[in-house]
């Protein structure tokens, strides 16, 4: 396992610096430390191939020139797969600059990817997206006000009729991840949590196996945002 460098402030390849609402600095330090000490392949959410994400993106028939954003995707290999599949407008947003830097170094210099280092609770999007993808960020929002801020940001970031894919720990999943409490969801719970503007198209359950061999059940929902 390799260690990732810690960073403070803005890096030259980032389009935005970390937004810091109340309490954000602690979250930044927590996730930078997680990636710096364990590496992107040592964290529990590591997937060499994000199979369910790719299946749902295909099922939703997302065009290759659509604007996609992967929320909390700093250490994910989804962006690698999207670039391989010739998607031309991908944004990866994460609170950890260490995770973003590690992922950026895997990709060709000319890859059509925008890197945004921000706390989703304080981020102000400057454009609209056709797909909002979030695997395992939303379930860390255990405070109702934080979930409301997340949904407000989503509303500001997506185009009318945009597609939305969100995954969280299932109702029988872990109660704690990376030392933090999480909010677990059934498909019905997650659909309700995303609000009346979310129209469900499909759900899926995933049995994710961590690098340590632990099985973690996930709930996935995919749909459109009116």
Image (cartoon, rainbow, N blue to C red):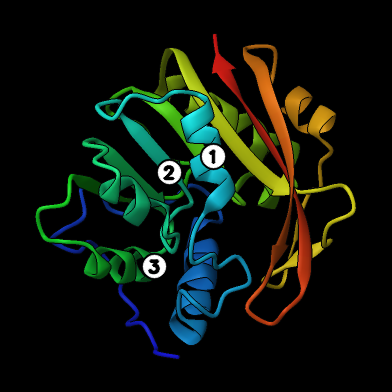
**Tag in front: 1 or 3:** 1
The x, y position of residue 187, in whole percent, is 80, 33
Element marked by disc 1: helix
Residue at image mark 3: 99
Q: Residue at x 51, y 83 (%)?
A: 38
Asked if residue 209 can be seen in this view, the reply is yes
Kind of element beneath mark 3: helix
Where residue 154 sits: x, y (%)?
Answer: 50, 27
Residue identified by numbered label 2? 70
Mark 2–mark 1 distance (CA, rounded to whole Å): 15 Å
Q: Nearer the viewer, residue 211 or 145?
A: 211
Residue at the location (65% across, 43% down)?
167
Q: Residue furthest right?
A: 172
Q: Secondary structure at mark 2?
A: strand
Near-viewer residue (194 or 11): 194
Along the polypeptide, which appears first: circle 2 or circle 1?
1
Distance of label 2 from label 3 (alpha carbons) = 13 Å
């Amino acid at each position: 396992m390799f260690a990732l460098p810690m960073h403070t402030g803005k890096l030259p390849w980032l389009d935005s610096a970390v937004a810091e609402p109340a309490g954000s600095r602690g979250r930044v330090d927590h996730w930078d430390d997680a990636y710096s000490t364990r590496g992107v392949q040592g964290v529990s959410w590591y997937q060499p191939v994000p199979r369910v994400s790719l299946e749902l993106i295909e099922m939703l028939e997302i065009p290759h020139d659509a604007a996609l954003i992967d929320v909390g995707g700093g250490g994910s290999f989804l962006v690698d797969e999207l670039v391989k599949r010739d998607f031309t407008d991908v944004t990866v947003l994460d609170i950890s600059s260490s995770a973003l830097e590690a992922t950026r170094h895997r990709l060709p210099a000319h890859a059509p990817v925008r890197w945004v280092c921000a706390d989703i609770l304080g981020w102000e999007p400057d454009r609209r997206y056709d797909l909002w993808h979030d695997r395992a960020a939303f379930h860390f929002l255990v405070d109702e006000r934080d979930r409301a801020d997340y949904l407000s940001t989503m509303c500001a970031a997506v185009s009318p009729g945009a597609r939305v894919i969100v995954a969280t720990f299932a109702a029988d999943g872990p109660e704690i991840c990376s030392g933090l409490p999480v909010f677990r969801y059934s498909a019905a719970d997650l659909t309700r949590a995303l609000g009346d503007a979310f129209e469900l198209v499909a759900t899926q359950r995933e049995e994710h196996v961590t690098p340590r061999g632990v099985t973690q059940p996930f709930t996935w929902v995919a749909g459109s945002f009116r």
